Amino acid sequence: MADTASSGEQEFSVHPALARMAAEGVDVAEVIALAGYIGASGKDDLVRLHPELDDMSVSIDIPKSDILAVKDAPAPTMPMGGVVVWLARTAEVTFRRTRTVSATAAQVRRFFDAGSVLEPNNTERAVDRLNIQLSPAFRAKVPPVYIPPDQCAVCTSKNCSSHCLPPCQSQ
């Protein structure tokens, strides 16, 4: 029979799994529940848990010795035989996430870009600079931010080498 706790006139039953863990000296505040579907782990001392049945590439391997309790999950929330596994939040588990996807070379190029490998001393390529390119029509509408000193007619700045505007734009 489950333990009971009372509050005034009403009595509450302690959940059997929580009562059992507390009786075994487990601090239930340090316990987490994971829901999923049990799969083949390949090792006798591990339980493999998949969170969903539609993507078997995601799973965790949990040492059986770290499992505190297992219960069948409610069918409405996890149809097809899901379970809830309770274990310490500090338990060492192995998380797996693997996928094999067909792709074109252009789609995966950013992961395997050989540009810096093939041209490690390329000084023409400034990768640490922002380079904003504007269409010619839009460029005509944007006022210049920097005009080289040799193109300045009258410099109104105290530091002419970094900021200089011709007289027609200085006012």
Image (cartoon, rainbow, N blue to C red):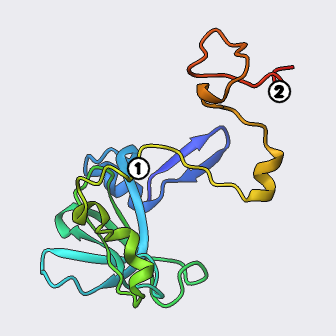
Residue at 67% of width from left, 22% of height from top?
A: 164
Q: Nearer the viewer, residue 22 or 67?
A: 67
List x then y, in percent, for residue 146: 65, 31
Location of residue 160 with respect to 35 vertically, above or below: above
Q: Is residue 77 visible?
A: yes
Q: Quadrant of the C terminus?
A: top right
- Choose the circle earlier in sequence order: 2 or 1: 1
Q: Could you tell me how far apart the alpha carbons at marks 2 and 1 are, in whole angstroms? A: 32 Å
Q: Nearer the viewer, residue 19 or 122?
A: 122
Q: Nearer the viewer, mark 2 or mark 1?
A: 2
Q: Which residue is mark 2?
A: 169
User: Tag 1, which secondary structure?
Assistant: loop
Q: Which residue is mark 1?
A: 127
Q: Quadrant of the N terminus?
A: bottom left
Residue at 61% of width from left, 16% of height from top?
A: 160
Location of residue 93 with respect to 52 vertically, above or below: above
Judged left or right of residue 145, residue 68 is left
Residue at 58% of width from left, 51% of height from top?
A: 12
Location of residue 146 with respect to 159 vertically, above or below: below
Residue at 33% of width from left, 44% of height from top?
A: 27
List x then y, in percent, for residue 66: 22, 61
* Amino acid type, mark 1: Val
| Quadrant of the image occupied by residue 95 | bottom left
Neighbour class for label 1 at 10 Å: few (<14), some, many (≥20)? few
* Amino acid type, mark 2: Gln
List x then y, in percent, for residue 23: 30, 50
Q: Are marks 2 and 1 in contact (CB under 8 Å)?
A: no
User: Tag 2, which secondary structure?
Assistant: loop
Image label count: 2
